């Protein structure tokens, strides 16, 4: 008993042992193999696939992000380093100018070199015009003398306190360091000649110079201090980096959009290949991919179309072989079965039936061999060209066709030279044409064969004096199982001979020409490209 799995979706596996009964022992051997009845199998989960278009865009965005981050970091580092160098140059320049003034400057009141520190610093500050981000001031250890107080050594004419040695001149800075005791103390108490500190107006880079009285003179020493506010510099760098970051973000967005669009255009043939491959079935191999472009993806689509052409040809040849075999073998099989079923006990009748059956079996064998040959004609190695002497090939063909029948054989032309052909296949085609000429022409008639070179083509022909073929049948006689006429004995062929001839010609990238008319005989001509070898020679036609 056979159980349909669809009737019991939840059925488990049931095995029927060889004994013939469930749980049977070593009884009679079963004529059937072990049968397995299974319920519906669960579908395997499919792996989630990531589109190649998305992968390309993501990798490109990641790469560009890394590059843009590197560009931003390098740009920020370069701008920061350049700003620090500019501040260092400004500090060094002010220090050098003050040192030069201290060495060569003179007191405008006396016209002599300066004799005290406060006068030197005061006169130098009066002659300076610091930038908006700079501050210049001096500091005398024991305060300022009375003359300095009267002339307003402090900024704005304001006299410094009695306990202060502050000296400053020029426009108001972002933050007056000289008026900030904590800032002044940090600067003057620092053991370094250059440093930085934070102020309400932002970071300040400073440099100080120790000023001593002239040699041999007594008096208080002092300090000359240069300060440079870097907040504006940092704001400029931050603004520049913000602009660069914004442009980088917009460029990254544009690149991602372009990558998505370009990847879609490039991968479009790949999607078509996948969709076409999914839609192709054994019953429909006609779909093809529309190819546009000249890149590797377009080449892939072209190769895929070529593969589909080969597959369609293979499936067509397979179906045609099965159809032809079933169509042509059905009749002889029916004949053989009918004769065998009706065969009696009479020995003479048995001999006649055996003869008929053997004849039909031989015909079946020839049909199968011809069909296999036609199927093999679709393979690349069906013909194996090699340099062939046309004169020798024509002579061999003439010698092989003469025993085919009682005809007046005439070799009317021989080509001189060499050509790249498969001599065995060409001989097979010419023998088939000669056999057809014998089959469809009267005994004693003339059959002409020959070969010639016309331009770059090799021509080999067989001409008979048979009944001829009507013009409307010229194309049909080369089809499989197409019979162009009756033989002189009234027999009909299988209709595969001329199909084989055409297959051999087409395998050589040539053709078969037919010139025939009723009552005028037929001339079949193989037209094959000579494909002359390098250094070879091709002879001329001999009439």
Image (spheres, rainbow, N blue to C red):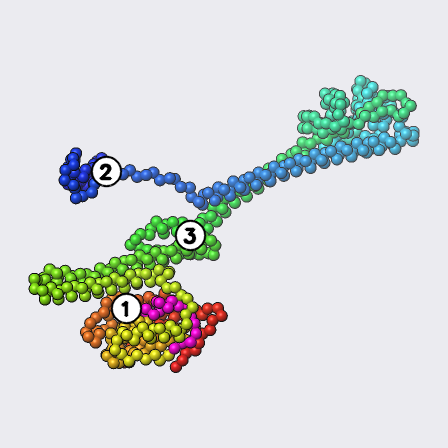
Return the residue at label 1. 497
**Which badge, 2 or 3, comes first in the chain's sequence?**
2
Residue 477, above or below 304: below
Q: Nearer the viewer, residue 26 or 58?
A: 26
Q: Is residue 323 above or below residue 392?
A: above
Q: Which residue is mark 3?
A: 269
10 Å crowding of disc 1: few (<14), some (14-19), many (20+) = many
Instruction: Verify whether residue 15 appears in magenta.
Output: no
437 sits to left or right of 380: left
Q: Which residues are magenta?
A: 414-429
Residue at the image position 72 percent from the left and 27 percent from the top: 195
Say which of 484 and 239 sits in front: 484
Name the residue carrying label 2: 39
State the image coordinates of residue 315 (x, y, percent, origin top left).
Answer: 31, 57
Q: Nearer the viewer, residue 24 or 129?
A: 24
Foreground: disc 1 or disc 2: 1
Mark 1 or mark 2: name the one nearer the start of the chain.
Answer: 2
């Amino acid at each position: 008993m056979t159980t349909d799995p669809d009737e019991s979706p939840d059925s488990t596996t049931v095995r029927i042992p060889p004994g013939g009964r469930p749980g049977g022992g070593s009884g009679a051997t079963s004529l059937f193999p072990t049968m397995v009845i299974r319920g519906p199998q669960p579908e395997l989960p499919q792996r989630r696939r990531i589109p190649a278009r998305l992968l390309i865009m993501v990798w490109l965005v990641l790469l560009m992000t890394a590059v843009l981050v590197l560009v931003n970091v390098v740009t920020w580092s370069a701008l920061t380093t350049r700003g620090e160098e500019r501040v260092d140059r400004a500090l060094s320049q002010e220090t050098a100018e003050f040192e030069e003034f201290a060495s060569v400057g003179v007191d405008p009141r006396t016209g002599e070199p300066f004799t005290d520190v406060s006068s030197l610093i005061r006169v130098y500050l009066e002659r300076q015009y610091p930038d908006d981000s700079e501050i210049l001031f001096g500091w005398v250890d024991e305060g300022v003398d009375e003359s300095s107080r009267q002339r307003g050594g402090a900024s704005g004419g304001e006299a410094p306190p009695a306990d202060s040695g502050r000296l400053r001149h020029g426009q108001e800075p972002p933050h007056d360091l000289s008026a900030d005791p904590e800032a002044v103390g940090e600067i003057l108490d620092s053991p370094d000649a250059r440093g930085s500190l934070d102020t309400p107006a932002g970071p300040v880079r400073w440099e100080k110079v120790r000023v001593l009285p002239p040699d041999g003179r007594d008096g208080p020493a002092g300090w000359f201090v240069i300060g440079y506010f870097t907040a504006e510099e940092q704001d400029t760098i931050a603004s520049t980096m913000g602009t660069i970051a914004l442009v980088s973000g917009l460029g990254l967005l544009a690149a991602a959009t372009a990558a998505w669009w370009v990847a879609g255009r490039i991968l479009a043939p790949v999607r078509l290949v996948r969709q076409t491959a999914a839609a192709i079935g054994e019953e429909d191999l006609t779909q093809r991919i529309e190819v546009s472009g000249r890149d590797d993806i377009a080449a892939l689509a072209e190769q895929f179309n070529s593969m589909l052409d080969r597959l369609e040809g293979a499936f067509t040849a397979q179906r045609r072989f099965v159809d032809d075999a079933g169509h042509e073998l059905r009749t002889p099989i029916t004949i053989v079965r009918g004769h065998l079923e009706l065969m009696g006990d009479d020995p003479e009748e048995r001999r006649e039936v055996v003869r008929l059956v053997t004849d039909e079996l031989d015909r079946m064998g020839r049909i199968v061999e011809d069909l296999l040959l036609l199927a093999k004609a679709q393979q690349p190695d069906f013909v194996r060209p090699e340099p062939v002497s046309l004169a020798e090939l024509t002579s061999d063909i003439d010698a092989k066709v003469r025993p085919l029948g009682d005809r007046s054989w005439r070799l009317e032309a021989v080509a001189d030279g060499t050509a790249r052909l498969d001599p065995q296949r060409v001989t097979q085609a010419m023998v088939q044409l000669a056999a057809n000429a014998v089959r469809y022409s009267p005994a004693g008639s003339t059959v002409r064969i020959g070969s010639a070179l016309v331009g770059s083509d090799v021509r080999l022909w067989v001409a008979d004096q048979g009944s001829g073929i009507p013009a409307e049948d010229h194309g049909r006689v080369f089809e499989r199982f197409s019979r162009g006429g009756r033989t002189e004995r009234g027999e009909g062929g299988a209709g595969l001979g001329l199909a084989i001839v055409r297959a051999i010609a087409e395998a050589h990238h040539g053709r078969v020409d037919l010139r025939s008319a009723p009552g005028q005989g037929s001339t079949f001509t193989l037209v094959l490209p000579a494909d002359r070898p390098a250094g070879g020679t091709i002879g001329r036609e001999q009439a």
